[in-house]
Image: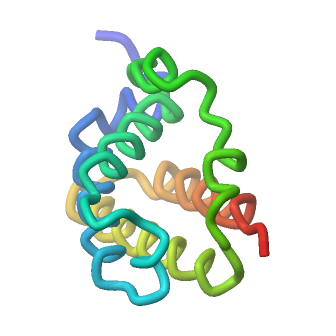
Amino acid sequence: MTDPTTVHDVVGDDFFVELVRRFYAGVAEDPVLVPLYPDDLSESIRTLTGFLIQYWGGSTAYSEERGHPRLRMRHAPFVIGPAERDAWFRHMVGSLSMLCAERDIDVQIEQQMRQYFEMAAESMRNA
């Protein structure tokens, strides 16, 4: 057996499926974020899951289907200020922390992911 080389190798697809499921459960109840999303979150769940799997070293199906992520461009139609950024980050890292604890994920992996999500949340801010 070879040593894992990516976060995805360590945590697997199911980690990201569950992370995104938990994240969107929070989004669906958040009055700051609900207006930014469609009523049916199915496509949002699918695309974020695919993106995260690819970003962290898994399948490249996301880019094969959608092309380059172009995250800022894809989020440009939405007003994302400090409140939206903070709400998004709170739900994402809350989901991440709980899932990492439940699955006994190495703290360094959790920190690496948390840093990425902090950067991503700030980079989407446009207001």
Residue 100: % across, % down: 32, 59
Residue 103 higher or lower than 122, as above or below: above
Residue 123: % across, % down: 74, 59
Q: Give the tally of numbered discs.
A: 0
Residue 74: % across, % down: 62, 46
Q: Residue at x 38, y 34 (%)?
A: 50
Q: Residue at x 77, y 67 (%)?
A: 126
Residue 57 higher or lower than 7, as above or below: above
Which residue extends farthest right? Answer: 127
Residue 48: % across, % down: 41, 46
Horizontally, is 85 left or right of 20 in the view?
A: right
Tell which of 109 and 12 is nearer to you.
12
Horizontally, is 44 left or right of 64 in the view?
A: left
Q: Residue at x 35, y 34 (%)?
A: 10
Image quadrant where one finds the N terminus? top left
Tell which of 65 and 122 is nearer to you.
65
Tell which of 53 and 115 is nearer to you.
53
Asked which quadrant contains residue 77, the reply is bottom right
Image quadrant where one finds the C terminus? bottom right
Residue 92 higher or lower than 33, as above or below: above
Q: Residue at x 67, y 72 (%)?
A: 79
Which residue extends farthest top? Answer: 1
Colour mode of the rendering = rainbow
Horizontally, is 113 left or right of 78 in the view?
A: left
Residue 16 higher or lower than 41, as above or below: above
